[in-house]
Amino acid sequence: MRIKKIKENEYIRTGDIWVRNFTKNNAKPISINSLCEHDRELLIQNEMTNVQRPDVYSIEEKKFEFPFVVLISDGYEFEMKQHILSHLPKDVAVFAVNRSLAKWELLTEDLRPDLRRSINFYIANNPYPECMSYLTKSNNYYPSCVASTRVNPEFLNKYHGNKFLYNPTSEKRYSGNINEGIYGNIDDYRNPICAGLCLASQMKVRRLLLFCCDDSFEDERQGAEQLENGLWQYPQHNVSHQIIDANLYWLTTQKDYPIRAGSCSSGKTYVNAPYIPPDKVTDFFTS
C-alpha cells in the first residue's frame, strides 16, 4: 500500500487513482487526480445549471446523523435479496444508488406494514443522460435525493422528490465550489457508492454495510473474467472496486471513533469490508 502525504492531506494509490483520506475534517479537500479532463465542459455546464435551480437545497442546510447505514445498489440478485432489508432494525438508514430505486419493491401494498421499508436517501452523481435510466418506472416513489452539483440536469428535472445538492471535491484541473459547511466537499470519484461512503462518514456512521454493491453476473460473456465465487465481471469494474476499497480503508482506520464495515455483495471481496452472508445481515447491525 502506497500512502502519500501533501500538507494536511493523505492519499492512497490504487491503480492510477489517488484516494484521499476524507475523514480528516481539518484538511482542505483537494483531489490530486484529473478524472474529468476529457469532459470538463459538460461538468461545468451541468454545475452551472444545477446550482441555479429554485427547487433544490444544499445538503448543508440540514444536519443528518445516521449511526447505522446500509448502502444498496442493484447488483447480483438484488430483486430477490432486497427482502432481507425488511428485517433490519428501524434505526438503520438506507442509502440507495444506481438502479436500486427503480427496482425497489419494499413499499408494495401486498407487504405487511411491518415489512415495508423506505429509502432515506437516493444518491446520484452520473453527469450523462444514462442517469435517466435510474429513475423509478413502476411507481411514483421518490425518496429524498442527494445529488452532485455535476449530475445530469435532466435527471433533476424528472426527479419529483426533495432534492439536495453536494459539492464534489475539487480536482487538480477543475476546482468547482469549495464547501466549508457541515459536510464539506464530498470525495465521490464520479461513483455514487464512494459518495455514499463519504456522506455516511460525515453523518457520523458507526456501522455500515454494502448490499448488492457489485456488477457481477452468472453467464460467461466475451471479455469477462471469472471471480472466486464462480460469477463473472468485466475487468473495468476492478478500478471502481479498488477505489471503493480504498475509501473503506480510510473509513475503518480513522482514529476519532471506531467504524465497522461489511459487505453482502457478490463481486470481488473487499479487503476493508469483510463479507457478510445474507442470513447474517440483521446480526451485523444488532450484535
Image (spheres, helix red, strand yellow):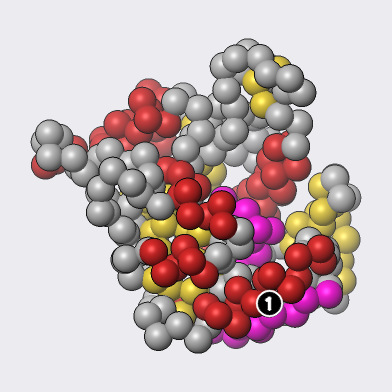
- Residue 259 point in image, percent of width and height: 53, 51
Q: Nearer the viewer, residue 71 or 177?
A: 177
Q: Is residue 47 left or right of residue 82?
A: right
Q: Is residue 60 left or right of residue 171?
A: left
The residue shown at (42%, 43%) is: 100
The magenta-colored residue range is 173-196
- Residue 216 point in image, percent of width and height: 59, 27
- Residue 36 point in image, percent of width and height: 77, 64
Q: Is residue 259 above or below residue 152?
A: above
Q: Is residue 138 above or below residue 144?
A: above
Q: Amino acid at mark 1?
A: Ile
Label 1, residues with CA under 10 Å away: few <14, some 14-19, many ≥20: some
Question: Can I make out residue 229 in this image?
Answer: no
Q: Nearer the viewer, residue 231 or 64?
A: 231
Q: Quadrant of residue 17?
A: bottom right
Judged by its main secondary structure, the magenta piece is loop
Q: Quadrant of the C terminus?
A: top left
Question: Can I make out residue 137 in this image?
Answer: yes
| Residue denoted by label 1 | 44
The residue shown at (65%, 58%) is: 190
Q: Is residue 119 left or right of residue 272?
A: left
Question: In the rendered structure, does residue 33 fall within the stretch colored magenta?
Answer: no
Q: Quadrant of the N terminus?
A: top right
Question: In the rendered structure, does residue 179 fall within the stretch colored magenta?
Answer: yes
SS state under label 1: helix
The residue shown at (74%, 73%) is: 41
Q: Is residue 128 left or right of residue 145?
A: right
Q: Quadrant of residue 198?
A: bottom right
